[in-house]
Amino acid sequence: MRLLLPSFMRYTAVGACATAMHYLVLVLCVEQGWLPAWAASGLGAIVGAQVAYAGNRRFTFAYRGEFGPSWLRFQGTAALGAVLGMAVVAGAVAMGLHYLLAQIIATALILALTYAINRAWTFE
């Protein structure tokens, strides 16, 4: 566990930057009335995933393998996280929660899952 902590902390730092981009897109799309919260969550996740891939490839996992295969695996993992996040946001908003609180809950739930997948599969 002690060996995983530094990697997880770097993953969390990169994730904070990616999450900032995700939330920026989310808030912009919802507040401008361009998309419902669940769809804006998905779009934000796509944008954030590109930031996260770049940071995790270099900073978190120091991965030196081929770009294409790891990018595709990362996108698959990000898509899984985005779909789960969209479901959490849709459900929470339907229950009356504010969309940002719903997104915070979704982000917290998905963090450990995507770390485990990316560590074991994407950047192996």
Image: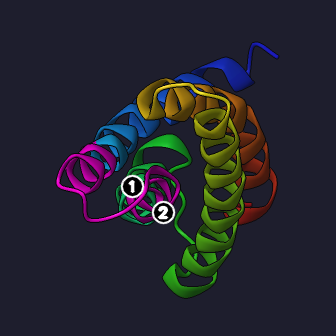
Q: Marks 1 and 2, how far apart in space?
A: 14 Å
The N terminus lies in quadrant = top right
In x, y percent, where is residue 119?
A: 72, 48
**Local secondary structure at mark 1:** helix
In x, y percent, where is residue 105?
A: 61, 26
Colouring mode (rainbow / by chain / secondary structure / one colour): rainbow
Amino acid at circle 2: Ala
Q: Which mark is residue 48?
A: 1
Mark sitting earlier along the chain (1/2): 2
In x, y percent, where is residue 81?
A: 67, 54
In x, y percent, where is residue 13?
A: 41, 29
- The reply, left or right, for residue 50 in relation to residue 78 is left
- Pick out the residue farthest to the top: 2
- The reply, left or right, for residue 12 in relation to residue 1 is left
Magenta-span inclusion, residue 26: yes
Which picture quadrant has residue 17?
Answer: top left
The C terminus lies in quadrant = bottom right
Residue at image coords 54%, 86%? 68
Dot 1 crowding, Cα within 10 Å, few <14, some 14–19, many 20+: many
Residue at image coords 26%, 65%? 34
Residue pointed to by mark 2 = 39
Q: Which residues are magenta?
A: 24-45
Q: How many marks?
A: 2
Q: Nearer the viewer, residue 88 or 55?
A: 88
Residue at image coords 33%, 49%? 26
**Local secondary structure at mark 2:** helix
Vertical placement of 30 versus 73: above or below? above
Amino acid at circle 1: Gly
